[in-house]
């Protein structure tokens, strides 16, 4: 079996050599078992010497394939580029910062051999702060009440995929991609195992609070239309309340005569309704924006340089 390792890279020059050494060790251990490897690195428009390091690795190891994107398109686009440039019978998706331990690939291969199309690594929350752990649990509890697929806390992109799963994911051509949800949506027999959280070997993570928030919103909006349905229900409730309040005001005026209207009541009602309207417009705007990007039909990424020579792989 040929196993393709897909590793998106963004400013990872400090850790790439160490990462490649580790996956090489795993490749050597699997070779006597009849498994070969190729390493597909995707430079997602890095601003450091990541591409230079990848070119050197490709010169030293004929199994190295690299794809350098014309700019930073984001991890989802880089992951898609990596999957499109694989030729393995199975694919392992992992980060290049060694937070996904390469030694777990052997366990994935064993579980894959038992008939599982997806072998998913679930990291524990060991070492995470209480605030981050609590926030993650609340997020997953909320999102799983809304989305059409099940998202599991601690489960990310680190997994082994069979070729038919890879082909199924590549067949989903949507522009706004949320891979964790796409992997869950395609289904196929899957199994999950846990591993201890590992620290980053070098460099700094590019994930900021803002990017994590946007990523969470992508997961919420990509697999359901319930926020739109909730906006409709909320509008119906507000209309009902407004109708009852109007009836109460008219009734009070008929019985007691017209009194001085309450300033606080009016301001509260106007402000509250205006806030709800802005929220509903924001929800509608999010979905409209996604439609806007889909209908333009732009490619997910553009390739600047690659050592993959097959012509069909150069088309993003």
Image: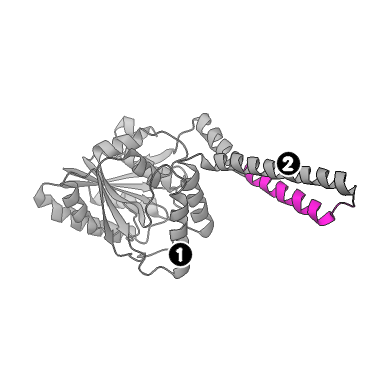
Task: Please state which of residues 238 and 217 is positioned toward the viewer in this rendering.
Answer: 238
Q: Residue at x 62, y 44 (%)?
A: 234
Task: Please state which of residues 124 and 277 is positioned toward the viewer in this rendering.
Answer: 277
Question: For mark 2, what is the residue?
Answer: 243
In screen coordinates, is 187 left or right of 77?
Answer: left
Q: Is residue 29 above or below residue 305?
A: below
Question: For mark 1, what is the residue?
Answer: 134
Give the structural element (helix, strand or loop) at label 2. Answer: helix
Q: Is residue 111 visible?
A: yes
Q: Residue at x 21, y 55 (%)?
A: 24
- Measured as percent of width and height from the top left, residue 134 is found at 45, 64
Q: Which residues are magenta?
A: 260-280
Residue 273, magenta (yes or no):
yes
Task: Please state which of residues 134 and 207 is positioned toward the viewer in this rendering.
Answer: 134
Q: Residue at x 12, y 50 (%)?
A: 31
Within 10 Å of the Cα at label 2, are there few (<14), some (14-19), or many (20+) other Cα atoms? few
Q: Is residue 29 above or below residue 91?
A: below
- Measured as percent of width and height from the top left, residue 209 is found at 52, 59
């Amino acid at each position: 079996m040929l196993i393709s390792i897909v590793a998106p890279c963004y400013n990872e020059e400090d850790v790439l050599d160490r990462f490649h050494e580790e996956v090489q060790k795993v490749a050597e251990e699997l070779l006597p078992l009849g498994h070969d490897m190729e390493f597909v690195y995707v430079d997602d428009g890095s601003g450091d010497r990541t591409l230079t390091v990848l070119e050197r690795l490709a010169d030293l190891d004929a199994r190295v394939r690299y794809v350098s994107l014309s700019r930073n398109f984001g991890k989802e686009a880089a992951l898609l580029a990596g999957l499109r440039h694989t030729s393995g019978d199975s694919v392992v998706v992992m980060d290049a910062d060694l937070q996904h331990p390469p030694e777990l690939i052997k366990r994935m291969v064993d579980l894959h051999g038992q008939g599982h199309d997806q072998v998913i690594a679930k990291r524990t929350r060991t070492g995470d702060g209480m605030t981050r752990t609590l926030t993650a649990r609340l997020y997953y509890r909320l999102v799983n009440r809304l989305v059409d697929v099940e998202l599991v806390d601690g489960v990310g992109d680190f997994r082994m995929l069979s070729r038919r799963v890879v082909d199924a994911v590549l067949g989903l051509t949507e522009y706004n991609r949320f891979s964790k949800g796409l992997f869950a949506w395609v289904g196929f027999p899957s199994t999950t195992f846990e591993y201890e959280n590992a620290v980053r070997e070098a460099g700094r993570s590019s994930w900021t609070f803002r990017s994590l928030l946007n990523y969470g919103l992508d997961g919420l909006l990509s697999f359901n239309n319930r926020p739109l349905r909730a906006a409709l229900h909320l509008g119906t409730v507000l209309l009902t309340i407004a109708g009852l309040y109007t009836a109460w005001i008219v009734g009070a005026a008929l019985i007691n005569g017209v009194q001085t209207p309450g300033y606080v009541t009016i301001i509260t009602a106007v402000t509250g309704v205006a806030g709800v309207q802005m929220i509903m417009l924001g929800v509608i705007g999010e979905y409209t924006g996604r439609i806007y990007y889909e209908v333009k039909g732009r490619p997910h990424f553009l390739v600047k340089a690659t050592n993959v020579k097959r012509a069909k792989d150069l088309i993003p």
